[in-house]
Amino acid sequence: MKTKIISAALLAASLMGLGGCASMDRSTAYTAGGAVVGGLAGNALGGTTGTILGAGAGALIGHEAAKR
């Protein structure tokens, strides 16, 4: 239950933060979005370590996707 509350709070904070970043370039927006999605997925699958690894992997994937 505690993990779901933390995940929901993280998602809400991320959406508010990204909403205020309309002037970001594409690469930065994709990297940040990938980190958020990866962090949430990592948290659901592996707790704290999963969150860190998921955020890193998501940021990398988002950055690479922005290059296309």
Image: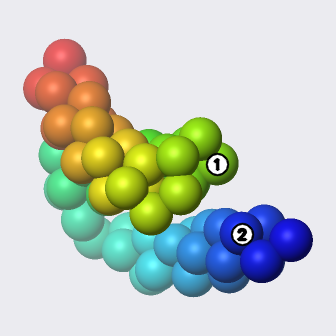
Answer left or right for 27 relative to 16: left
- Picture coordinates of residue 30 (x, y %)? 31, 45
Looking at the image, can residue 30 be seen? no
Q: Residue at x 19, y 37 (%)?
A: 60
- Picture coordinates of residue 26 (x, y %)? 23, 47
Q: Residue at x 77, y 77 (%)?
A: 2
> Cβ–Cβ below 8 Å for labels 1 and 2?
yes
Nearest the eye: 55 or 44: 44
Nearest the eye: 49 or 11: 49
Q: Type of residue at label 2?
A: Thr
> What's the distance in space between the residues labelled 1 and 2, CA to CA?
8 Å
Q: Quadrant of the N terminus?
A: bottom right
Q: Residue at x 19, y 18 (%)?
A: 68
Q: Type of residue at label 1?
A: Ala
Residue 60 drawn above or below residue 14: above
- Picture coordinates of residue 23 (x, y %)? 28, 70
Residue at disc 1, secondary structure: helix
Looking at the image, can residue 61 be seen? yes
- Picture coordinates of residue 12 (x, y %)? 66, 76
Q: Which residue is mark 1?
A: 44
Quarter of the view holding residue 32: bottom left
Quarter of the view holding residue 57: top left
How dense is the environment of label 1, judged by Cα within 10 Å: few (below 14), some, or many (20 and up)? some
